[in-house]
Structure formats: C-alpha cells, structure tokens
Image (cartoon, helix red, strand yellow):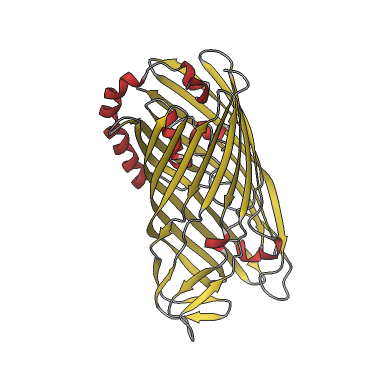
Amino acid sequence: MKNVQPPIHRVLTGSRSGAGIGRRLMPLALAASLSLWALVPTARATDGYQLIGIGQYEKGMAGAVVADPGDPMTAITNPAGLGFIPPQAAFSAEWFNPTRTSNFGFGQVGSHSNLYGIPSVGWVAPAFGPHLYFGGGMFATSGMGVNYLQPNTPMGTVQVYSDIQYFSMTPALAWKPTPNWAVGLGLNISLEQMSMQETFNGVGINLASPSTAFGAGVSLGVLHKINQYVTVGLMYRTPTFFTPLTWQETTENFNGVQGNSGQYSTTLNYPQQISLGAAFHPTKRWTISVEGQWINWSGTLNTLTLHGPWVGTNQVVMRTHWHDEWVFNIGTQYQLTKWLAIRGGYSYGTNPIGSSDTASNLLLPAIVQNTITVGATQTLGMGWSLTEAYMHAFSNTVNGGPIAPGLPGTSASLAENSFGFQIGYQF
C-alpha cells in the first residue's frame, strides 16, 4: 500500500508495530486538542470563510487531499484517510494575514486587525479491533471578520466590526476491510463564536460582545486505491446545526426598524459540502492530486435572521444572499531526497458574494478566488518530521450599490497571506 501514501510516508521511520507507543501518546494528543478548544484565537479563511486546508501538509497541497491523505488532519477532510496513514500525531501553527479594504461611499478604509493565529492538532492509531483506525483532533477550520473605523463622513463616524470563529473537535473512525478500500465516519463537535457591529454615528446594529453557540454534524468518507497509480476519494459533510447565538442589548436599529432593550438572537449553521478527488502516482516519488468541492453557502447564509424585541415585529432579516461555491484544487508533491519532500498547489473558488450584494456583505467580505501555495517536509529521524507551507490568495474586489439611497456605491477588497509550520511524530 505504500504507493497510496504521500512520499513523506514512504521514508519516515517507524511502523504499526509502534501502536503501543501510539496508545500511550493518544491521551496526550487528546488533552492538547481539548486545551486548544479554550485557547485557540481567531481563524480566517479562503473558500467563503473555510480554510482551503487544515494543517501545513494540506495547505501545501492547496487543499487537494480528499484522495491523498497526508497526516491526521484527514480526520476532518476525509475520515477514511485514517486507514491509509501510519500511526502518528501532528501539531500545526499558522500565522494568517488578510488585507481588507472597503468603501462605504466615503472613500477607502482599511481594516485595523490583520494578523491571526491558527493552531490545529491531530492524531491516529489502530484501535478497537482488526482493520479499525481511530483518530481525530481539534481543528480551527473557518472564520472571517473586519474592523473598520472611518470618522468625519457625511453620516458621522462609520464603525463596522465582525468576528466569526468556527472550531471543530472531530473524533473519527476508519474501517479498512481490504488493502484497497477504507470508509470513515467523523463526528464534528463544533463551537462557534460571533460578534458584529455596523453603526453610523452610533446608530445601527451593535452586537459586539462575543456570543458562543455549540453544534454537531457528521462527516462520511470513502477512499479506494484503484491500482498503484490511481486513488480516488469522496467525502460528504452534513450541515452542522448550532444552538442560537444570543446577546443582551439595550437598543438596536436596522434599516429604520427600532429595537427595544432585551435579548437578540440569530442562528448560523455551517453548510453541507461534498468533495470528490483523485490522486495520481506517475512514479513512486511523484504525486498529483486534484479535487472538486461544492459548498452549500446558500443553505446557511442566504439570509441572516435577527430575532428580538423589534418595534412592530419579532425579527428582521439581513439579506446576505450568499451563493453556493464551487472549488477546484490541484496539488503536487515530489520526494527530492530521503529527507526532503516539496509540494505546491493552486485553488480556485467561485465568489459566493455577487456584486449586487456587496453593500449587504461589508461585514462578511469573503471574496478571494485564486490562491497558490508551496510547502515542504523534512524528515528529521527517529519518527519526527517538520512541515512548512506558505499561501497567497490574490486580491479580489467587488463593487456594488450604495448602503443608502443617494450615496455613492460601495466596494470591498480582500487578499490573504499565511505561513505555518507543523511538527509530526510517527509512532
């Protein structure tokens, strides 16, 4: 089965005979993942507000990994991949730098927050019986936000702030009945935080205190090695259904609808998605992986309903009108030497926000489309490895109508850079 593995897994030391060590280290990895639940800071992303890859192996492949598992982060991208990688743990840290500007009709203004950290941890080991592999971890998978302050406009001081964070702790189980087939199931136990503010001279929506919601969903995966040259993979992730986000506020105002003091709430679920891919192995050293993905943003962000003590009604609707997104990823890796593997990739995603909806999404400008990545892994010996990746998402701009009648049009721009490293240990 070694031709199914990425080149890094054909040269790392260790074997499944180290499963006893793996079982002793699994509780440590789980404890680390639980600590990340409490300590992880904001994450930001590219496909809508979803990262193109979790961890630095996946990032270096531009997210084209549904048929090419490379580390335990596959627990969330395709849980069947746990059956095709050696027992191991991986710890990833990433620095994410988005550059955002908007024009509310009064000239360009830049966001005041531009650097975020993205940690992830994962592990996998044989467990429970023959042909079964148990893994998982804590993953910062999605997020977005802006922080604009523009004083001295015809509408007074413009203050626009948003922060959406999404984390998942995913225990997963893979069953590999034959050397060529594996199926996997992952339970996405998720935490979501959200805060937002859009005020003009102090009037508007001000829900800037973070609110937390909890949710759950399921990931199902299949991986099949057709022959020594081709492997195919499929993953379906159900929607993640969350409890309501709530705020206790004094007064609110949205599009002229006044709100009284009391509790305001909304529900933001995470979309279902399907990923289908194939990995090609022209030689033992070279892998090419391609993937197509559909993300059902229209099922969760077509509208955002804000319930509360509004005057004359119990809800107002923010018409965000996000469209479903189609994503194409391609990545390649080559084993240069026994200790060095290099990789790179390209990702393209359709823009979920149309120009006609620009003014409605200045809080949520997830609009980048073209992304390139590079990465490398060094085998350090004794089962240890070090992986790095760099990502650049090219700037994209959308232009739309005004925020209010009689004002100039609006625009939003976004570009992204990130760099991260990952430490791996194979049992």
Comparing 204 with 179, the one in front is: 179
Q: Position of residue 292 (x, y in %)?
A: 61, 43
Residue 3, horizontal then vertical, whole percent: 52, 21
Residue visible at 35% across and 46% down in the picture: 37
Q: How many marks?
A: 0
Q: Is residue 382 above or below residue 46?
A: above
Q: Position of residue 365 (x, y in %)?
A: 61, 56
Locate residue 337: give its quadrant: top right
Tell me if 33 is positioned left or right of 182 in this view. left
Observer-nearest of 72 and 41: 72
Is 98 rendered above or below residue 318?
above
Tell me which residue sits at (43%, 46%) in the image: 41
Q: Quadrant of the C terminus?
A: top left
Q: Is residue 47 visible?
A: no
Q: In the image, residue 359 lies at what x, y percent?
A: 65, 65
Can residue 46 be seen here? The reply is yes
Q: Residue furthest bottom?
A: 312
State left or right for residue 299 relative to residue 186. right
Q: Is residue 415 above or below residue 27?
A: below
Instruction: Pick whichever, 297 or 34, lies toward us.
Output: 297
Measuring 59% from the left and 15% from the top, which residue is drawn there? Answer: 336
